[in-house]
Amino acid sequence: MSRKQRVLRNLRTLESELLKSASTIEIMERLVATRDICRQGMTENVYAKYKEVYDGLILSADQMLKNRELSLNEETFSLFQELLQYIISETEQEKRFKKDIFFLPYKASMWDSLASVWKAT
């Protein structure tokens, strides 16, 4: 599964958990994990655009956690949902995710020939 697909899966799961009133700790953990996947999967310039939104979402989740209820107030909850929908739509349109490439030799005795490829990366 590509990094973009993992990010989108996490965000969509987060959106459904939010509607089911999942615990704020779970929401926060999923947000942090998703942000980390984005950081690894994008260049610094591209990630900078997303970082601010993720930080805002994490800050909101942290405030909700401190107050021990998911809907701190309607405005915070509404803003959280709006930011989440925004980051989902932007991620769907993003074309600059890094690709993961996996090299395998055609037989086990050829592993040593891949050492130069591995060292070059």
Image: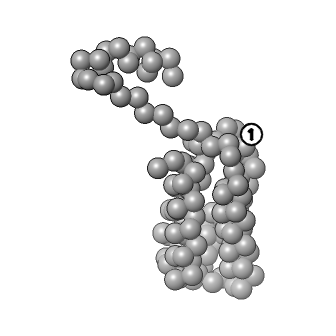
Q: Residue at x 75, y 82 (%)?
A: 75
Image position of 16 with respect to 105: above or below: below
Please name whichever residue, 47 or 99, is drawn nearer the observer in this view of the structure. 99
Q: Secondary structure at mark 1?
A: helix
* Residue 106, visible in the rendered structure: yes
Image position of 69 with respect to 101: above or below: below
Q: Residue at x 63, y 83 (%)?
A: 71
- Of all residues, the one furthest to the front in this rendering is 106
Residue 12 percent coordinates (x, y): 56, 68
Residue 7 percent coordinates (x, y): 56, 56
Please name whichever residue, 118 or 44, is drawn nearer the observer in this view of the structure. 118
Left/right placement of residue 112 relative to residue 89 reads: left
Colour scheme: one colour
Image position of 39 with respect to 77: above or below: above
Image position of 60 with respect to 54: above or below: below
Residue 118 percent coordinates (x, y): 43, 21
Q: Which residue is mark 1?
A: 45
Q: Residue at x 59, y 43 (%)?
A: 41
* Residue 59, visible in the rendered structure: no
Q: Residue at x 66, y 57 (%)?
A: 92
Amino acid beneath label 1: Asn
Residue 107 percent coordinates (x, y): 26, 23
